[in-house]
Structures are given as C-alpha cells and as structure tokens.
Image: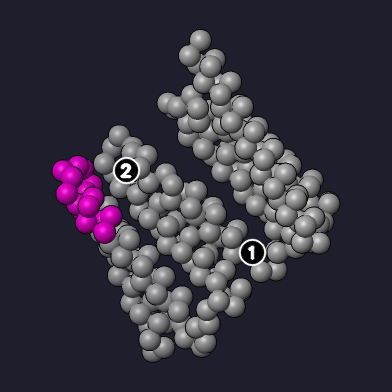
Amino acid sequence: MDIQRQTQTGWLAGLGSAALATAMVTAAAQSTGRFHWWAGFILVPGALIAACGGPLLARGGGRAFGGYVIAGTGALVFTVGTLLMLGWMGVGWPVMIALPCLAVAGTYQWRADHPLGRGLHRTVASLALVGAGLGVTFLLITTGLVDFGDTGWWGGFMMLAAVAVLANALELGRHRIPYRLQAVTLLLGPSVVAFLLGLRFLRGW
C-alpha cells in the first residue's frame, strides 16, 4: 500500500505540476502577444514526459534515477516548447546548454559504490556545473547584459574546468585502490593542458 500511495502521489504531483506549468506559459504568451499556438505540440508532450518521472522519483530507490532522467528529458523538451511559444529562441538558446548541464550536475551526490566510479562521476558532474555556467554566460551575452568585447573570456571556463578535474583527481588519490595512480595521471594530464590553454585564450597570448 505504501508503494501504491507513493506512486499515486507521484502521478498527482507530476500531472499537477505539468498542467500548472503549461497553463502559466500559455497565459504568459497570450498576454505578451507572442503566442505561437503550434509550439503547444512540443510544450504539452514535454510536460507529460516530465510528469511520467514523478512516480519513479516518489518511489525512490533504484528507480529514482530513471525517474530523474525521464523528468529531466521532459523538462528539456518543455523548455524548447516554452522558448518557441514565447518567441524567445533567438535570445534564449543558451538555456539549452545550461539546463542539461544542470541536470547532470544535480547527480553529484549520487555515489557509486567503488571509489573510482564515484570519482569519475563527480568529475563529470563538476564539469557539467562549469558547462551550466558557460550557458548562463552565453545567455547574459545574448540578452545584452554583459559584453566582454574581444577578450577570450571562454578561456576562464576552460581554467575552471581544469580546476574541477584537478580537484577530483586529488580527492581520488586519497583512496587506496588498484590503478589509483593511473587514474589520477589520466585526470591530471588533460587538466594541466586545459588550464594552460584557457590561460592563453584569456590573456590573449
């Protein structure tokens, strides 16, 4: 009964959130005079896909990851529909970079049993967080809120990514596991190269 109740709660929460989000986007589009009705064929399926992840998330356990993936995929499709319905795709396209990266970064606390798997997963999640920051920066540029001119500002994100990899490599080195040195070396090498390249672009050398 507990599982059935959790599933029902997940469906109610998912479908309710999907209906509310769809209604809000539609109302906003109509009120601003940017209503593109055909985008509803993307918006509504995206909301329903995201809602399908609710029951799995509510049940927890091993199914929660599947629910997270389904909900994240639906949210991405829903975001595309939102941008198209509001006519913001020309400006808001960087959201399509930031959102998937945030979804991956959100799995940072999900720990694998083996330290090596855990370290590699955290490395990917950390890089995804840097990618989300890159998407947000692109959004600020497209909206005209910031202007870096001719500087190689993207080099700063390369350096951040290198630092993220380096930090996870050092953390991985604390564990007494087979192939520890090989794994750390494989992470350290690219991080050093990426940091130097990022510094080169940032400084314009």
Residue in the picture at 78% in, 47% down: 40
Residue in the picture at 44% in, 47% down: 106
Q: Secondary structure at mark 1?
A: loop
Residue contact at pointers 2 and 1, CB within 8 angstroms: no
Q: Residues within 10 Å of mark 2 (few under 14, many from 20)?
A: some
Residue in the picture at 54% in, 52% down: 100
**Does 176 lie within the magenta span?**
yes
Residue 137, percent from left and from top: 51, 70
Q: Amino acid at mark 1?
A: Trp
Q: Amino acid at mark 2?
A: Arg
Q: Residues within 10 Å of mark 1 (few under 14, many from 20)?
A: some
Residue in the picture at 64% in, 64% down: 93
Q: Which residue is mark 1?
A: 93
Q: Quadrant of residue 55?
A: top right
Which quadrant of the figure contains the C terminus? bottom left
Q: Nearer the viewer, residue 66 or 106?
A: 106
Residue 2, percent from left and from top: 48, 14
Classify residue 127 as left or right of residue 74. Answer: left
Magenta stretch, residue numbers: 167-181
> In the picture shown, does residue 68 fall above or below 27?
above
Residue 144, percent from left and from top: 59, 78
Distance of label 2 from label 1 (alpha carbons) = 32 Å
**Does 159 lie within the magenta span?**
no
Q: Which residue is mark 2?
A: 118
